[in-house]
Image: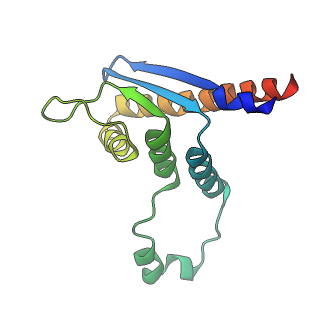
Amino acid sequence: GFENSQDIKVTKTIKHDETGLELTLEMKHDEAFQRAFATVGEELNTRNPLTKNTLSRQAMEAKKDEMHKNVALMFVIGEYLLAKWNVQDTDGKPLATNGDNFLKLFEHLGQTEQGLVCVTMITNAFQELMEEYYDKIQNIKKK
């Protein structure tokens, strides 16, 4: 039956030697993640036409709290899929795994070439995780 899909869990661990970053992404049945990812996915697939109105000062002011689409995706990964990591705060205490802290890491990494390589690794791992997870669900449905 399909109820078994709620038991499926897929994990991917990433180690980036240059930065020393290690993290584990874990995907399992999670309604909130599904909704958040669907919301970001819709945005990633939309190409809103640019007009004078969409670029006006008022429009830009109204949008100042909006996230760039890729940043939004990273927030969702950090908030829902980040199971563990070896990141510490300035006092050397382990940093909580959540969307905000994940974005801080990305802002920090995004400034260096090594960091961008690391970001690409995480993005690729996320895509592999999604594919593996949905493959397993499809296999259950077929049985």
Instruction: Give the answer, above or below, for where 134 lies relative to 31.
Output: above
Res. 134 visible in picture: no
Q: Point out the residue furthest to the left here.
A: 91
Instruction: Give the answer, above or below, for where 46 lies relative to 128.
Output: below
Give me the residue at 55% from left, 77% from top: 54
Instruction: Give the answer, above or below, for where 57 lies relative to 20.
Output: below
For the N terminus, the quadrant is top right
Give me the residue at 35% from left, 16% from top: 17
* Rendered location of residue 140, percent (x, y): 79, 25
- Residue 93 location, quadrant: top left
Res. 8 visible in picture: yes
Instruction: Give the answer, above or below, for where 62 lies relative to 12.
Output: below
Give me the residue at 49% from left, 51% from top: 72
* Rendered location of residue 44, percent (x, y): 61, 53
Identify the coloring. rainbow
Give me the residue at 59% from left, 24% from top: 10
Would residue 91 be found to the left or right of residue 58 on screen? left
For the C terminus, the quadrant is top right
Would residue 70 be found to the left or right of residue 48 on screen? left
Total numbered circles: 0
Question: In terms of depth relative to the viewer, which is nearer, 39 or 28?
Answer: 28
* Rendered location of residue 5, percent (x, y): 71, 30
